[in-house]
Image: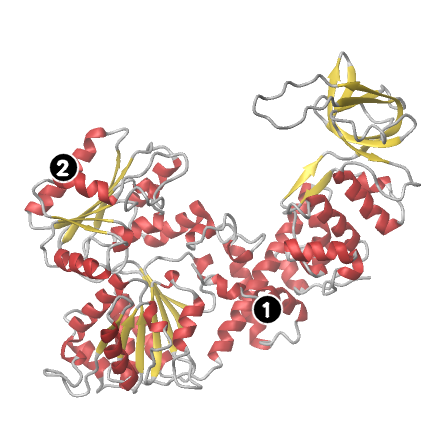
Amino acid sequence: MATLDDALEPLLGRKAAQQLAEFLGIRTVDDLLRHYPRGYNEGMTVRRTDDEPPQEGEHITLVGVITHAEAHPMRKQANHKNSNKKNYNNEYLRVTLGNQRPPVTATFFNARFIKKDLTEGTRVMLSGEVEFFKGKMQLTHPAFLILDPDRPKNVGTKSLASIAEASKKVHGEVRLSAFERSYFPIYPASAKVQSWDIYACVRQVLAVLDPVADPIPESILRQHDLMSEDEALRAVHLGETDGERRRARDRLTFDEAVGLQCALVQRRHGEQAESGPSGPRRTDGLAAALLRQLPFELTAGQRDVLDQLSVELATTRPMNRLLQGEVGAGKTIIALLAMMQMIDAGYQCALMAPTEVLAAQHARSLREVLGPLALGAQLGGVDGATRVALLTGSMSQAQKREVRTEVASGEAGVVIGTHALLQEAVEFHRLGMVVVDEQHRFGVEQRDRLRAKAPAGVTPHLLVMTATPIPRSLALTVYGDLETSTLRELPRGRQPITTRTIFVSEHRTWLDRAWSRIGEEVRSGRQAYVVAPRIDETDDSGNAEGAPPSVTVVELFDRLRSRQLAGLRLGVMHGRLPADEKDAVMNAFRAGDIDVLVCTTVIEVGVDVPNATVMLVMDADRFGISQLHQLRGRIGRGAHHSLCLLESRVASRSRAGGRLTAVAGTLDGFKLADLDLAERREGDVLGRNQSGRAIGLKLLSLAEHRDVIESAREFCELVDEHDPDLAQHPGLATLAARFTQTDRIEYLDKS
């Protein structure tokens, strides 16, 4: 007998076990039984002589004795002019099963190598689609299997031979009962290990599998109307009815959700058990001074989140928190106040941004907000002031050395940078807090590398920020090891953004009106963005399969300055520009020296130009829903009404057109995030092209199973209160192991 933890080699033999391990990563019984079918093939029940006659097109499997077999030459094919292949006179074979009523004929093409096996008097199984010709039933090139117990090896088509081999290994002989099924599972396979091979191994293992102990309590199973673990692992492979297989998949989907949530809960609570730096709130420090000098009042939501952070920063348990909110919801000022609280306690803070543009924007805005509080040991600075340092990869070596010296000495209390912060040469004096902006651009191993620069034995507090609203199911999985805070209200004075769609195939003149509107805004003293999906013709990122090429920034810039926007001051911005050119362009746009910035999504995050009031996104259907919402957030940041225009050549009633209409219909990023998840599936939403489910999940869908994920989270939190090490729940530990004993949890947070 066998258990889920057993290795496969003693059960299947060395060759089969090695192939499963090498080509599919399957090494244990549990691995094999959780390699679920991707579908089911219908129609291989063995038909007896007294069964009802089949219908045209029905897939049947017959057992009988060949009463007649005759080979005929196939018509010779003409050689292709340039073909080097030799032309053989091949044969086709026609056999008759005379014991069937009525008799059945089967025709095999290219039969030169099989006619020696399909001879008169041979008992054979045939499986194929029924046809009728002049009232006579026939099969064309069906699958076949020779049923001869004296043959040492099963001879026939691989699909049937694999089933026969499994039956022979289990029972010592080939039993017809192995074929008497309405459905056969079809597995994810490879060229070396095909679906029928996997099915044969599964049958062989299930025949000797001990009853599987259930990792989920009976009360939970009843609550969610779930079948047992043992039933599910068998029914998902061998269930005869659609209802039985569906219930099995429901149960195994819950297993995946529980395993993932157990892993995340363990990780989160494990990090909280580490020693963090205590930074109690002070009434006489930089945080209090900054709060007093702010030229605006915090919203109620900002005050609530700040109070929450302040309490957690004061403890010796490392904070692990996600702060999400709409574009412009005021996340950065909350992060800055939290960092000042840690600086008051004698620690340094690091803020990591995904791009140099965003890092430079943060450095500039934080210095402006802090004012004299950021002029430590400088003229005009107040007593106890700190410094804000910026470190990016494009800096000269001399500049980097100067910044690294400030950081290592502790003179710089706030250190802002890109991936350059992760370099070994960057050493902190006393790192106590890490802030990661736009977390979806980083992996968890990157933020952990930055946290590792703290003093020995100290795990810095972590604040992760994102302006991309996250659906609840993603918050419980992708960010499942973080507590979540949400800012929903916008700061006072923010103007709403009107969004309109321009379907040029239906309203050709509307695009001309859009260019005119941009000109009107510029003449009123405002500025505009024009966004395109691609840089130039060598850039394929904005092209969609089967669609005409999207417009490029280079082509659009040249056309607009000579035609539609002639006379206006245009600038161009994209990811291939050197860092100093990007800075120069952005500084000019920010200063009002550029009227219209023609750009790619390089301005998606971090660009803050309150005077920009209009944005035109070209070929907007080439962008995702959340990405369009992020882009739209670059306007509406000042006191003037703003307008976002989404141009597209698709039809308004098409699927892509529907997405654009949805974006135009709401400013609620959380609604759009849910729509984005349902529309593009989790692989794309998380920034990965996985053509399927994220993080190695086989059945659990982040888009479809939110209720399952929430139920699993609630259950795992309850278990963790009483058994954090899962010592009393070995079955749950097994479910969690596929996420904790591999790199899947790390991969979970990547994008």
Judging by the rendered image, the residue that carries numbered circle 2 is: 564
Local secondary structure at mark 1: loop
- Residue sitting at x 24%, y 84%: 411
Local secondary structure at mark 2: loop
- Residue sitting at x 21%, y 49%: 497
**Residue count near mark 2 (Cα–Cα under 10 Å), binned few <14, some 14–19, many ≥20:** some
Give how far apart the Cα atoms at labels 1 and 2 are.
Answer: 59 Å
Quarter of the figure with residue 617? top left
- Residue type for callout 1: Gln
- Residue sitting at x 32%, y 85%: 429
- Residue type for callout 2: Gln
Q: Position of residue 663 (x, y in %)?
A: 31, 45
Quarter of the figure with residue 355? bottom left
Nearer-the-camera pick, 94 or 593: 94
Nearer-the-camera pick, 715 or 591: 591
Residue 98 visible in image:
yes
- Residue sitting at x 47%, y 52%: 683
- In the picture, the quarter occupied by the C terminus is bottom left
Quarter of the figure with residue 114? top right
In the image, is 173 to the left or to the right of 182?
right
Judging by the rendered image, the residue that carries numbered circle 1 is: 741
Nearer-the-camera pick, 284 or 529: 529
Judge whether 2 appears above or below 68 on screen: below
- In the picture, the quarter occupied by the N terminus is bottom right
**Residue count near mark 1 (Cα–Cα under 10 Å), binned few <14, some 14–19, many ≥20:** few
Judge whether 707 appears above or below 505 on screen: below
In the image, is 450 to the left or to the right of 128?
left
